[in-house]
Amino acid sequence: MSDILNDRQREAVELTEGPLLILAGAGSGKTRVLTHRIAYLIDKCGVDPWNIMAITFTNKAAGEMRERVDKMVGAGAESIWISTFHSSCVRMLRRFADRLGYDNSFTIYDTDDTKSVMKGIMKRLQISNEDIKERTILSRISDLKNNGIWPDEFTLSSSGDFREARIASAYRAYQNELLKNNAMDFDDLLVNAVELLKTNKDVRESYQDRLKYIMVDEYQDTNTIQFEFIRILAGTKHNICVVGDDDQSIYKFRGANIRNILDFELHFPEAKVIRLEQNYRSTQVILDAANSVIRNNSERKEKSLWTDRASGNALHFMQFQTAYEEAEFIASDIKRRNREGKLHYDETAVLYRTNAQARLIEEQMVSSSIPYNVVGGVNFYARKEIKDVLAYLKTVDNGVDDLAVKRIINVPRRGIGGTTISRIEEYAAERNISFFNALEDIDYIEGAGRAKSKIENFVTMIRVFRAKAETLSVTELIKDILKSTDYIEKIEADSDEQAMEKTENVEELISKAAIYEEADPEGGLSGFLAEVALVSDIDDIEGGERVLLTTLHGAKGLEFSNVYIAGMEDGIFPGYVSTLEGNEEDLEEERRLAYVGITRAKDNLTFTAARSRMVRGEMQYNKTSRFLNEIPRELFVEKVPSAKVYDLVEYDDDSYARSSFKKKAYEPVVSLNAGEDTSYAGRDTSYSGKKKEYESVVLGKSKKAAGYDKGQRYGDYKPTGVKALVKGGITKGIAGAGEKPDYEVGDKVRHIKFGRGTVKEIKKGTKDYEVTVTFDDEKYGNKIMMAGFAKLVKCE
DNA sequence: TAGTTGGGTTTTTTT
DNA sequence: AACCCAACTA
């Protein structure tokens, strides 16, 4: 990428004073602008690097910016404050949390931790999980925090409503518990940092004085409290430059407030706005696709990406019978193109909506021996063995973190059971002391007879660790803990196949600690634990010649020459909930996600979909994604070598066929010639209700016969629900496996390969009906087959 | 106390 | 399908 700025970019770089909103479309060089701006401030305006702050969302983005700025600025670059929102807050709170009643060595609770805490509270307050789910309460609490509403205020406002009042009491108890444990959740980091700045004039002014120029990346993803944070820091000078793209706002579920960017000019009336619309990343075809999708959103700042790149390769869309075949295709296509020298693995990504979809694709990558990285799934730091070791470290670092202590008191097993723990909890609650303090009082606790000596040993062990922590490095401390507790040996002793992996993970943790200590020798144990709490998986993906598998969310900010977007189905992407009546806002967010996905591609973009897929143990039959329908048909590769209707699939006409069929409709499936470079296998939309017979349909050639009008987008059609009559080797669609077949013993049926036959027996199997058929063709004779798989169709 | 089993549940995305 | 939890058994 050239380092020469275009006019708009230059303007954005040089407008250093006052509030500035840079609306930066995907691939428009926003990072380039930000880094140049920092360099400009230092070199041309004489600003001290110490006075500059740049805030990002991920550690990865922060790291990349740091690297680029280092190269441009040289000496002094290290004193620029570049970090994420959460890390910035931690940094402030590590110095001043005592002003808010916390100890400066507070721990950070992740989502799992907060769940455990909430579970305990609900038990105590006798809120049953059936009445209000813990997840519901936690997300309410998160909302409330993000809107600056504290338990006291919420208790008042909710007093009239029973259910709300219970949530309020849970909120209050939760907050007390965290404070008692000297812990903060992710939201607290922001909330408390803002509180700190608001209530402490000296702190606020010292930061305001230092941070004279503030830049915020991915501004569209900020939430209300984050806005508050930067607004306070910007003080009265308002030297705040935010960069974002409202079309890429995809974190509403996490509290992101799209109004922050839409209303920037209301918050700062003197704000200047600069639009960056020239895209340096993608071909025109890809941009056209992106633009044509996002155009369907209503609440957005009008803009349109353009490029002077050539129009480029056409888009591909492939639809398959099953998610398995979809995955198979993606892997084989990548493999083939790589073999032909048309694709580099490290320039390739497979994107999907949900982490669950990764599994099948990953399997196919393995069997095609394609090197790959998967982001997401179970976060490294969320794994049991890692959380165990971290809980030891937290127990050493922050003695009042009851959650950590309770986690490890019997891990590895040392014969301290539930009854004993409850006793100790009661004792601690009566005296309002921490769980660990209660352990130290074990002599005075009744009914702890047998466990007593075990607890004494535990307490002694932790005390020894604490003493050692004064001198040992984090890596040494971890090793010492593992050795003293025989942790590794215990893993190997009682767990099975996963022992290897667990051991490797623990070793990985040690090397991560080593890396941390080298990078930040002053950080210590608290620093390491804080860092670990705030890293995400995408942050430490190893590079190399590897295909990246990630969710669409995970792909934000990245770019690849080749992008595959899998699972293009209504109900998957867009997600089911967002397709329901009244959820238009959610649907728009999904559409932005589609926009993000499409704009990751530089040169080649392939969409795939499956007609049927297993979701949470149940078979789903989904229509192709409505987002595909929003892309002009002309942008796709169209030549189809003699596509044939070879199957009909039934789906639920009104709600995307979630296993229970109400209204049934049928649509023809066009055969796929996978592997052909020109293959285009869209749903053929030929079924109009009038035409009831198909021999074959050739896309491209007989569009008219297939029900298309010129200019019509492929996929725009209305199924009539009339059952299609089918001739010539076309079988009826897959009924859901396990559904009773609509033929009976004695009926004549047709099989796609074996031809005509007579049903001899129908037996209900464990998962599906087993059907025995005697085929007319003696070659095949008697066959037993699964009804859902055999796709037998009744005939005369 | 610990291991097993059966039953019930599951928003999708994550700092 | 996968996970978690409660109840049951050794």
Image (spheres, coloured by chain):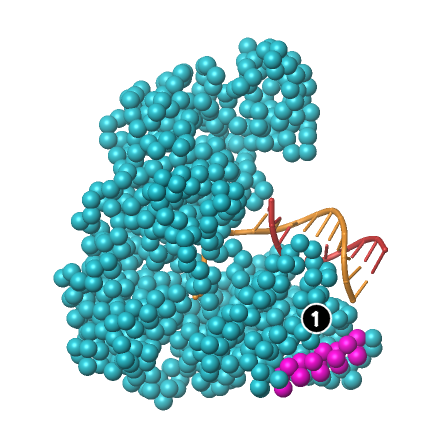
Chain colours: A cyan, B orange, C red
Type of amino acid at the residue the image marks with label 1: Asp
Residue A517 or residue A388, whichever sits in front: A517
Residue A650 place in picture, x, y as percent: 48, 28
- Residue A751: x and y in percent read 55, 18
Quadrant including the C terminus of chain A: top right
- For image coordinates 64% across by 27% down, the residue present is A769
Can the viewer see residue A162 in this picture?
no
Crowdedness of circle 1 by 10 Å Cα count: few (<14), some, many (20+)? Answer: few
| Residue at (39% x, 35% y) in the render | A318
Residue in the foreground of this view, choosing between A265 and A715: A715
Q: Considering depth in this image, is A112 or A47 the residue closer to the camera? A: A47
Q: Is residue A646 left or right of residue A690?
A: right
Tell me where residue A642 sits by quadrant.
top left
Count the labels in the image.
Answer: 1
Q: Residue furthest bottom?
A: A202
Q: Is residue A185 magenta?
A: no
Which residue: 27% across, 55% down? A27
Say which element carries label 1: loop
The region drawn magenta spans: A451-467
Task: Specify the subunit that label 1 lies on.
Answer: A
Residue under pointer 1: A486
**Position of A70 compared to A365: left or right?**
left
In percent of the image, x 71 and y 83: which residue is there? A460
Left or right: where A311 falls relative to A666 = left
By secondary structure, the bulk of the magenta-drawn segment is best described as: helix
